[in-house]
Amino acid sequence: MATIRIAPPTPAHVPDVHELSLAEEEALDSIDPLRHLRDVDDADLVPAQPPSVHDQIICIGVALPPDNEGSQQWPHQNIMISLAVDAGPGCGGIAWPAGEVLARYLARRGRALQGSRVLELGSGTGLVGLVAGRLGAHVCVTDQAPLVPIMERNIALNALQSNVTAAELDWAHPVPALDPPDLILAADCVYFEPAFPLLVATLAALVPLPPARAPEVLFCYKKRRKADKRFFALLKKHFTWSPVDDDPAQEEYSREAISLLRLARRAQLNGPTSPGGVAVA
């Protein structure tokens, strides 16, 4: 005899916070900036942590372009960066995958960075900025105050004091007066949802509207949560983006859900809402 299954009645639909419109989300953020921290597991707010890291020194190598091998400026095929890592000040005190991807991409550019002014946001250990400094750029690595000492330590470990400086830049505060950079770097900055609007506001403050001359912006991130879409919904109000398509390692790191993007400031804030041809889902 066939068994007949009767589906239970569909419960009444109750909208939750995830179904709020972007405008409603922003209005709630302005009233209660810490609302995302309530009733949410810590695992949903920060990337999965590696085994405990306390005051260790690691060494990371990034490859230079083949035509630089044997040159007077770079006598070796790789740039080697000594990195003090310490999870004590927070997850920014260790090296994360998107930072290594962006550092390797910069190294592939070789001499192109020499003499340029570079600003890195959310630098953490400073790895990406240190590689840029080793390539001859004048770099300012920035992060919140607790991470400034580890950035300064890593600058000294690599004897890059003449090329790289560390400074506090808290996205919750107005951007201080800075020399206009030629290049802005950001890696692994998309993981803490309450900081999404702050990061977007900081980027918008640093990159002028067209037709003013704007710096190149390289943005590398690893997709971890569905909430990352909210960051890009906020970002597309001010920027378009496109994939960096001249990186031969793109296929490899894309398998790890890492994207390397080039951001461009929108000509007007109320322009088209579709991003620059890149799916972020």
Image (tube, rainbow, N blue to C red):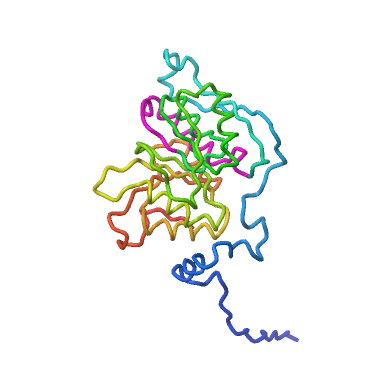
| 58 in magenta | no
Residue depicted at x 40% and y 20%: 67
Please tell me which residue lies in front, 192 or 106: 192
Please tell me which residue lies in front, 248 or 54: 54
| 109 in magenta | yes
259 up-or-down from 274: above or below: above
Please tell me which residue lies in front, 250 or 154: 154
Please tell me which residue lies in front, 149 or 8: 149
Give the residues drawn in magenta, as a range: 91-119
Q: In x, y percent, where is residue 267?
A: 27, 54
Residue depicted at x 40% and y 30%: 109
Q: In x, y percent, where is residue 221?
A: 50, 47
Residue depicted at x 49% and y 61%: 230
Q: In x, y percent, where is residue 88?
A: 68, 41
User: Magenta part mainly helix, strand or loop?
Assistant: helix
Q: In x, y percent, where is residue 73?
A: 43, 16
Compared across the picture, whether 1 is left or right of 48 comes to right
